[in-house]
Image (tube, grey):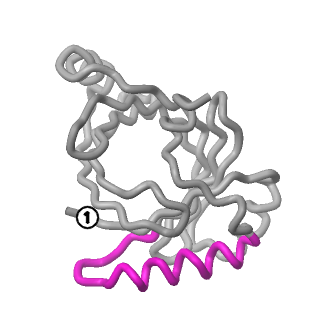
Amino acid sequence: MARNVEIKARAADLQAVEARVRPLADQGPIELHQDDTFFRCDQGRLKLRDFGDGHGELIFYRRADQLAPKCSHYEITVTDEPARLREVLTQALGVVGRVRKRRTLYLVGATRVHLDEVDELGCFVELEVVLQSGEPIEQGEATARALLKALQIADDALLAPAYVDLLQSR
């Protein structure tokens, strides 16, 4: 199973964060529209990500909900029929929630920096430090903390829950 270290924070000023990430980035900006449908799943989370262009990804992952950088274990498979797959999974498992967002992606080394505008929730920054096989989690956590500092994201902006949980708790 692939792994990364993730952390999420509210962003009062997404443009200011983007101005700080742009000079650090190896790639980006890449503009994405994502429509994530979450399904009932007892062993973690299962979501179907529809990119709105006839392509999608089925993503299964496990991670703790905590404020600090956290390790996520995940598997991804691609689909050319996301709408049909959503129908089948809805019938088989039931839907827990749906998250629609506009995402601007930057790559900073092994880190995916997501600048997210989430419908009904607001603006967020999400970091995903991709870990290589055998790479210690602590190294990914240190990378995430250094990038949080470089982006001037304060500890009191950090969030533990997933977007789908934030939507459900409103």
Residue 120 drawn in magenta: no
Residue at position x 23%, y 78% in the image: 133
1 or 65, nearer to the observer: 65
- 94 over 2 or under it: above or below: above
91 relative to 139, above or below = above
- Looking at the image, residue 16 lies above or below residue 69: above
Residue 136 lies within the magenta run:
yes
Q: Residue at x 30, y 29 (%)?
A: 39
Residue 30 spot, x, y in % from top left: 58, 52
- Residue 142 position, x and y percent, is 51, 83
* Residue at figure coordinates x 26%, y 49% from the top left: 76
Q: Give the percent coordinates (x, y) of residue 15.
A: 80, 54
Q: In the displayed structure, would residue 151 be above or below residue 56?
A: below
Q: Is 38 or 132 nearer to us in this picture? A: 38
Identify the residue at image location x=26%, y=42%: 78
Place residue 167 in its image quadrant: top right
Range of the magenta residues? 129-152
User: What kind of element bears circle 1?
Assistant: strand
Q: How many marks?
A: 1
Quadrant showing the C terminus: top right
Q: Quadrant of the N terminus?
A: bottom left
Q: Is residue 71 left or right of residue 122?
A: left
Dot 1 surroundings within 10 Å: few (below 14), some, or many (20 or more)?
few
Q: Amino acid at mark 1?
A: Ala
Where on the picture, by quarter, is residue 131?
A: bottom left
**Residue 63 in the figure: left or right of residue 69:** left
Q: Which residue is mark 1?
A: 2
Question: Closest to the observer: 48 or 7?
Answer: 7
Q: Position of residue 128 (x, y in %)?
A: 47, 64
